[in-house]
Image (cartoon, helix red, strand yellow):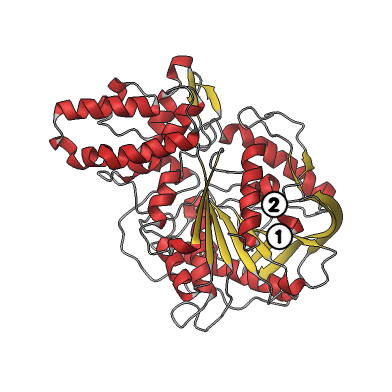
Amino acid sequence: MHIDRAIAALALLLTAGTVQAQTPPSPPPPPQTTAEPRIFRSEGQAEIGGTRLRYAAAVEEFLLPGASIFATSYVRGDVKDVSTRPVIFAFNGGPGSASIWLHLGLMAPRRVDFDDPANPRTVPPFGTVANPDSPLDMADIVLIDPPGTGYSRVLPGAKVEQYYGVEQDAKAMVEVVRQWLRRHGRANSPRYLVSESYGTIRAAVMARLMAGGPTQTGGMDGLALNGVVLLGQALDMARGAEGDDRPYLNILPSLAATACHFGKVAAGCTAEGQGDAARRFIEGGYLAALHAGSRLPADRKAAVARELSALIGIAEKDILAADLRISGAAFARLLLADRGQRVGMYDARFVLPSLGAGSDPVADDPAMGQYVPGFVAAFGDYATKTLKVTLDLPYEPIAFREVNGRWDYGFGPGVPVGRNYGTDLAAAMSRNPAMRLMVGTGWYDLVTPIGSAEYTLAHVGVPLSATRFHAYPSGHMPYVGAEARAALIRDLRAFVGGRE
């Protein structure tokens, strides 16, 4: 098994398999209405997008059979006609991750207080600062935490299998969207999904389900989407088996960009230029070399290794030892080995010493290990002091063992499966010709690299004429760092505003 796939299995992706599909469990019945949902309300004002505005915030409970799901919404207060005002429904991935990352990294009127993209503060105290980059000036925002994450829970006596699975989860999230629109009188507002990592799979399946149909939900739901945003897309779960060379091809632009970032290739390079050079190298000989396998002549293999070394900054001997196939994990270990450092898989701009590295592929990742503490601690203060939440519950940022480890891809809890969920998105866009797609990827994301996004969406039938691709100087969370966040929010504003 590729080590990249092992890392992904424990983190924001799961490994691919070859099990045959089974019928997923039935969707949850209509929501129960006997209990009164808990709602924590607050108000604020902020300078966003150059405009001073007031907003109402609410941490709201949505009750489904056997589950209590919380979502945090921000609604601008001075809008006279909300019928034309967009609503953005946002969530992260995992599976088993709360929406804390999008919440305090990009969407909320306040964000976590660190902007150094490589050396964030890693010890308390942590806090938040004003976020003028929030899209709240032009859209209302709803951040959803699936069951088992955040404050959301599968209730005592219920079965987690009812919610911990691809179809089950997507159907529950559609129900939360439906309830929120009904509760707020926004059934006819333009609506968008903003998703990240495994959340991009959730968004694709939700988009397919929201139109309804006899084989989908049993009715014609007609809950149309105006657009979907995929950040760090993870749609293709069928890649990475032994003998599959796609991961090595798709990660190459990100490896080249990272080598440039650390000065390991020719002076004067840029991430964009390195990405383009990597694509030319793939088309000009690398693909053919990998396709040849053990049939590749030794002299040709040596020539490819020299070109690859110049492109990604790894020694020729290491490339030859890896049979021309450099994985993200190998690259992260080798690139700065001469400096005694390793780079992050989730954001290769982050580094830590090679010595003393632990074996946990997430907690010991240079990026995850350094930026997670700030998000978690800052959110705790923000939830109680600003959002006025008084729940006697711990906020679960990522539930690996309880949720991720029990996830059902349609083959039973915890059984990995290979499938490309881009086909769900293609089906949704075929049914809804006006729906648009935005794909954003960080150049330094070695888990869901830019090449994977380009390849996946070009091979599933998604209409590329309705799709916009963007790359940012960041990692798996493409809003970490002031430059990346400003560029991402500019593109998001244009997308939701219909200007691209």
The CA span between labels 2 and 1 is 7 Å
Which residue is painted at 22% across and 25% down in the image?
A: 302
Give the residue pinned by disc 1.
141
Q: Does 371 appear above or below 263?
A: below
Q: Amino acid at mark 2?
A: Met
Q: Disc count in the image?
A: 2
13 to 255, vertically: above or below: below
Q: 159 and 319: which one is in front?
A: 319
- Helix or strand or loop: what does disc 2 sit on? helix
Query: Is 328 placed left or right of 104 in the picture?
Result: left
For label 2, the crowd category at 10 Å Cα-Cα, with few meaning under 14, some 14 to 19 and many 20 or more, is many
Q: Position of residue 493 (x, y in %)?
A: 66, 56
Residue labelled with disc 2: 107
- Residue 354, given in percent of the width and then of the height, sits at 48, 20
- Is residue 271 toward the left or the right of residue 43 in the image? left
Q: Secondary structure at mark 1?
A: strand
**Residue 364 in sight from this viewpoint:** yes
Pointers 2 and 1 in contact (CB under 8 A)?
Answer: yes
Where residue 329 sits, quadrant-wise, is: top left
Dot 2 or dot 1: first in sequence order is: 2
Q: Quadrant of residue 311?
A: top left
Where's the C terminus, which quadrant?
bottom right
x and y percent of residue 297 in the render? 13, 31
What type is the residue that disc 1 sits on? Answer: Ile
Q: Nearer the viewer, residue 249 or 448?
A: 249
Q: Position of residue 50 (x, y in %)?
A: 80, 50
The 10 Å Cα crowd at callout 1, few under 14, some 14 to 19, many 20 or more, is many
- The reply to whether residue 415 is in sight is no
Quadrant location, the N terminus: top left
- The mark found on residue 154 in the picture is none
Q: Which quarter of the figure has residue 182?
A: bottom right
